[in-house]
Amino acid sequence: MSNEELLRKSVIEGVLEKRERHKDAAARQGISERQLRRILQRYRLVDVTGLVSKKWGEPSNRKMEAAKQEIVDNFIDTIGHF
């Protein structure tokens, strides 16, 4: 779990224990109240594992194919050596 997800856990528990309102908790997390409700729902269904991002272990959408990356690297090397 990342630090952000650990913080989210404490915020969610505060909401569930009625120590904090949805509006305040969402503002503290920098998310909308609707997103907070989705997170609460997921937390109630699967506990802490619902807070962990589903994207862990997946490659980035911005990752370049190896062949393309090699072309770019070669181009940069060529330009860098005047």
Image (spheres, grey):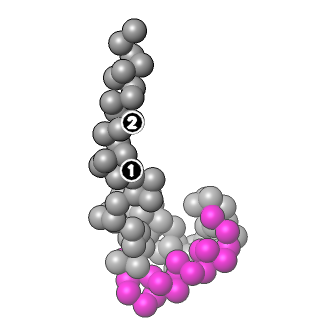
Q: Judging from the image, what secondary structure is the residue with disc 1 in?
A: loop
**Looking at the image, do the residues carrying marks 2 and 1 touch, with CB atoms under 8 Å apart?**
yes
* Quarter in which the N terminus is drawn: bottom left
Up-down relation of residue 47 to residue 1 (above or below): below
Q: Name the residue under label 2.
A: 72
Q: Main secondary structure of the magenta part?
A: helix
Question: What is the x, y in percent for residue 52?
Answer: 38, 70
Q: Judging from the image, what secondary structure is the residue with disc 2 in?
A: helix
Q: Which mark is residue 64?
A: 1
Question: What is the x, y in percent for residue 45?
Answer: 43, 90
**Which residue lies at the image location 39% right of the left edge and 62% below the top edge?**
6
Which residue range is magenta in the image?
A: 31-48
In the rendered structure, does residue 43 fall within the stretch colored magenta? yes
Residue 30 visible in the picture = yes
Quadrant in the rendering for residue 54: bottom left
Crowd tier of the residue under label 2, counting other residues whose Cα lies within 10 Å: few below 14, some 14–19, many 20 or above: few
* Quarter in which the C terminus is drawn: top left
Q: How many discs mark residues in the rendered view?
A: 2
**Which residue lies at the image location 30% right of the left edge and 64% below the top edge?**
57
Residue nearest the viewer, comparing 30 with 61: 61
In the rendered structure, does residue 2 fall within the stretch colored magenta? no
Residue nearest the viewer, comparing 77 with 4: 77
* Mark 2 or 1, nearer chain start: 1
Determine whether, in the image, residue 67 is placed left or right of residue 24. Answer: left
The Cα–Cα distance between marks 2 and 1, rounded to whole angstroms, is 10 Å
User: Amino acid type of disc 1?
Assistant: Met
